[in-house]
Image (cartoon, rainbow, N blue to C red):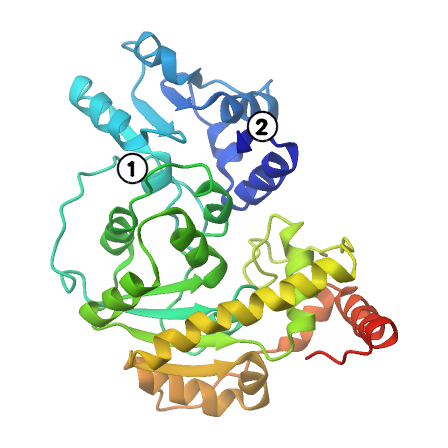
């Protein structure tokens, strides 16, 4: 099984720490019960054994663990998660039963998971919560910087609701229901008649690879829901590739969305030229999805990180008009140069990659 692979587990739990799950679980008292696969329970036990007060139960010992003192139950497992949630809700109606995949993992920008009861999914009209507006971006193209500048100009926040951890989780979680997750996100985060969200293509590709929800269905959803889409990519695939390696080895998805005011330095792990080239090719493939959305006639605004940085004021005004939130006053321009403080060795690695591409292979890649 994939969860038995050490490299998979290390990456999975590193990315999970982006959500602060273990911090919150270690705050729970004995009236909380965590029901999960053994590999996850083992990690919970080891995260802070002296502080752990909540109860843990494997899937074959659930009902024995649900005592009178238990008030809240979190269920997180590879197979049959929602079936077990519904069973526990029916059997213990006075207890709060929470799906890890569809509720606990669904957080806002504070990235604080909440033990909210998982509600039944009822398919509603696509416009019930307002029209969706997406930033659809190739992975690690710094779309988070664009989203941050939006907020600084009074525009809506585009948060990555379907986060990076799902790239790993969907490779083992069976029967992920895209519509259920999207409905839950809309219920909690729709604002001003719209649902604003950042969606990165590495996660979207994981959905395509592991569920019946493919690109054609995604485009049909965009059409039927009346969505607008800002398409973001980066011309400089080398910098994007090195940035991806920096951040993949970090709990952070982006240097622009770190929780603390004092930005942490992100180190580099050099995978070598082969790994960097593979990432560059992957970004080219991800851009094909942007092309497909644009070619399908979905209302879209396309921009690269480089074009945005070259003329932020014009770009922000145009995108604000596009999403229906025009800006009348002055524009606040973001300071992208501080990325050197966040990841001071990034440019050194980029220079080394370019030199190796030219010296060894005679290729001058963008």
Q: What is the total number of numbered labels drawn onto the structure image?
A: 2
Residue to which mark 1 is pinned: 116
Q: Residues within 10 Å of mark 2 (few under 14, many from 20)?
A: few
Residue 142 seen in the figure: no
**Vertical side of 265 occupied by 326: above or below:** below
**Vertical side of 29 occupied by 204: above or below:** below
Closer to the chain start, of discs 2 and 1, is: 2
Place of residue 326 in the rendered image (x, y in percent of width and height, measured from the top left): 32, 86
Label 1 residue SS: loop
Number of the label disc, if any, that sits on residue 199:
none
Point out the image quarter for the C terminus: bottom right
Place of residue 207 in the rendered image (x, y in percent of width and height, measured from the top left): 39, 52
Residue 156 seen in the figure: yes
What residue is rendered at 37% in x and 39% in y?
101
**Vertical side of 115 occupied by 356: above or below:** below
Residue to which mark 2 is pinned: 4
């Amino acid at each position: 099984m994939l969860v038995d692979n050490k490299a998979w587990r290390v990456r999975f739990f590193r990315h999970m720490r982006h959500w602060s799950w273990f911090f919150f679980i270690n705050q729970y008292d004995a009236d909380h019960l965590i029901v999960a696969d053994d590999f996850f329970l083992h990690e919970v036990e080891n995260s802070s054994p002296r502080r752990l007060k909540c109860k843990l139960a494997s899937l074959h010992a659930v009902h024995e663990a649900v005592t009178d003192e238990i008030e809240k139950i979190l269920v997180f497992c590879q197979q049959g998660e929602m079936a077990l949630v519904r069973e526990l809700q029916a059997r213990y109606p006075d207890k709060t039963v929470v799906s890890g995949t569809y509720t606990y993992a669904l957080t806002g920008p504070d990235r604080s998971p909440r033990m909210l009861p998982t509600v039944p999914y009822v398919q509603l009209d696509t416009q019930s919560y307002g029209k969706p507006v997406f930033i659809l971006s190739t992975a690690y193209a710094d779309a988070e910087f664009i989203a941050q500048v939006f907020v600084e100009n009074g525009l809506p926040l585009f948060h990555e609701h379907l986060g990076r951890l799902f790239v790993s989780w969907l490779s083992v979680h069976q029967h992920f229901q895209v519509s259920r997750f999207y409905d839950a996100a809309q219920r909690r985060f729709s604002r001003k008649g719209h649902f604003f969200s950042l969606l990165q293509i590495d996660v979207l590709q994981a959905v395509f690879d592991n569920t019946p929800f493919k690109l054609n269905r995604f485009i049909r959803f965009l059409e039927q829901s009346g969505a607008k889409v800002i398409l973001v990519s980066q011309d400089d695939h080398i910098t994007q590739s090195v940035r991806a390696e920096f951040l993949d080895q970090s709990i952070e998805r982006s240097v622009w969305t770190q929780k603390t005011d004092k930005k942490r330095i992100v180190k580099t792990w050099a995978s070598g030229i082969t790994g960097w080239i593979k990432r560059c090719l992957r970004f080219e493939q991800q851009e094909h999805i942007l092309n497909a959305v644009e070619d399908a006639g979905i209302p879209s605004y396309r921009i690269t990180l480089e074009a945005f940085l070259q003329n932020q004021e014009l770009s922000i005004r145009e995108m604000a008009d596009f999403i229906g939130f025009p800006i009348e006053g002055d524009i606040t321009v973001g300071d992208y140069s501080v990325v050197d403080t966040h990841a001071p060795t990034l440019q050194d690695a980029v220079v080394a990659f370019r030199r190796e591409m030219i010296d060894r292979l005679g290729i001058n890649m963008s």
